[in-house]
Amino acid sequence: MRQSSSSTAPVAAPPGYAERLGLPWWAWPVGLALAGLLAAELWMGATGVRAWLPFVLLLPAAVATLWWMGRIRVTVEAGELRVDDAHLPVRFVADAVPLDAAGRREVLGVGSDPLAFVVQRPWVGGAVQVVLNDPDDPTPFWVVSSRRPVELAAALLAARDAG
């Protein structure tokens, strides 16, 4: 077997990260039950269009609202942090600090910076504070909800160091 004379080894890309900030499972039955209860209140035993229209309108609206609330995706790939439609090149990341629920409350509490970029979901306990190093951007940091904040912070720092 002949071996190649080139000694260049393929450069391993840093591991990516992907997460969807979906609703907890119990939010779906609760939301649908509330929509059904509201539809039944509007129906109130009426006949004709009022008998079926509240259910036809409110149940799909509830499904669409619940889906919309849990649609946010957080990814680290191709040298960028993407949170929904916002993106941040990782070269501007100075540090990434994983936060538990208490740390998130502290960062977003009274002492929070009004220029910070925040994507916070109350049903997700953890978050990551991404400190920025971009002289052209007035945003001091991002706070992004995450169910796996340690992994997200590690992926951000690995992507920054690889680039």
Image (cartoon, grey):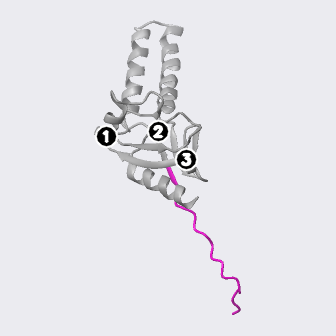
- Tell me the magenta residue range: 1-18
Amino acid type shown at disc 2: Phe
Amino acid type shown at disc 1: Gly
The prevailing secondary structure element of the residues shown in magenta is loop
Taking the spot 49% from the left edge, 19% from the top edge, the residue there is: 58
Q: Are marks 3 and 2 in contact (CB under 8 Å)?
A: no
Real-space Cα separation, disc 3 to disc 2, in angstroms: 10 Å
Residue in the foreground of this view, choosing between 46 and 163: 163
Residue to which mark 3 is pinned? 92
Could you say where residue 138 lies in the image, as x and y percent from the top left?
Answer: 53, 33
Neighbor class of circle 3 (other Cα within 10 Å; few <14, some 14-19, many 20+) is some
Neighbor class of circle 2 (other Cα within 10 Å; few <14, some 14-19, many 20+) is many
Quadrant of the image containing the N terminus: bottom right
Could you say where residue 158 lies in the image, as x and y percent from the top left?
Answer: 49, 58
Residue to which mark 2 is pinned? 141
Describe the element under mark 1 as helix, strand or loop. helix
Could you say where residue 132 lies in the image, as x and y percent from the top left?
Answer: 50, 43
Disc on res. 103: 1
Residue in the foreground of this view, choosing between 49 and 156: 156
Neighbor class of circle 1 (other Cα within 10 Å; few <14, some 14-19, many 20+) is some
